[in-house]
Image (cartoon, rainbow, N blue to C red):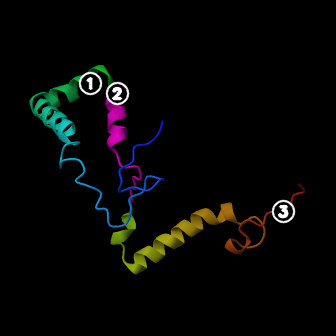
């Protein structure tokens, strides 16, 4: 299908130098339907929203959970850190406790952390 060109365009449809591109679409014309839809949706939500949420939660929990999942941020980072309130001495003591607890699992040959990952060689 041949493309329509105005005299202000070249053979490839590009605007020629000095062309302002015309007036374009009237401001807001593309958004009228979307704005009307959102206004209607908002009015309906204000009247029925909480009751609908409760009904969906009770009758269709799978859809309720789907909506919850959809509105959650893609990168949801929960940082639970009880160590923020510790003094330096308390933090050092906690590290030593953890080290003592995991050292038997880490030490395979020798005396501990320096040997981590250096178990007996295996043939592959």
Tell me the residue at 67%/60% (across/down): 105
Residue 42 drawn above or below residue 114: above
| Residue 48 on image: x %, y % | 13, 27
Q: Of marks 3 and 2, which one's residue comes earlier in the chain?
A: 2
Q: How many marks?
A: 3
Quadrant for residue 57, please give it.
top left
Label 1, residues with CA under 10 Å away: few <14, some 14-19, many ≥20: some
Picture disc at residue 120: 3
Q: Of marks 2 and 1, which one's residue comes earlier in the chain?
A: 1
Separation of marks 1 and 3 at Cα, in angstroms? 58 Å
Left or right: 31 as drawn, with respect to 95: left
* Foreground pick, 115 / 4: 4
| Residue 54 on image: x %, y % | 21, 27
Quadrant for residue 49, please give it.
top left
Tell me the residue at 42%/80% (across/down): 89
| Residue 124 on image: x %, y % | 88, 54
Q: Which residues are magenta?
A: 62-79
Left or right: 84 as drawn, with respect to 25: right
Tell me the residue at 18%/46% (across/down): 28
Question: SS at mark 2?
Answer: helix
Picture disc at residue 56: 1
Picture disc at residue 21: none
Q: Of marks 1 and 3, which one's residue comes earlier in the chain?
A: 1
Q: Are marks 2 and 1 in contact (CB under 8 Å)?
A: yes
Picture disc at residue 63: 2
* Foreground pick, 3 / 104: 3
Separation of marks 2 and 1 at Cα, in angstroms? 7 Å
Q: Nearer the viewer, mark 1 or mark 3?
A: 1
Residue most toward the front?
7
* Foreground pick, 108 / 50: 50
């Amino acid at each position: 299908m041949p493309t329509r060109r105005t005299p202000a365009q070249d053979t490839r449809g590009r605007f020629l130098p000095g062309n302002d591109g015309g007036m374009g679409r009237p401001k807001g014309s593309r958004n009228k339907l979307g704005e009307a839809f959102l206004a209607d949706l908002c009015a309906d939500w204000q009247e029925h929203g909480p009751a609908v949420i409760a009904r969906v939660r009770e009758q269709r929990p799978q859809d309720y959970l789907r909506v919850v999942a959809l509105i959650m941020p893609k990168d949801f980072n929960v940082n639970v850190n009880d160590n923020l309130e510790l003094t330096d001495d308390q933090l050092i003591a906690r590290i030593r406790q953890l080290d003592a607890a995991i050292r038997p699992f880490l030490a395979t040959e020798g005396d501990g952390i320096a040997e981590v990952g250096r178990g007996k060689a295996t043939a592959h």
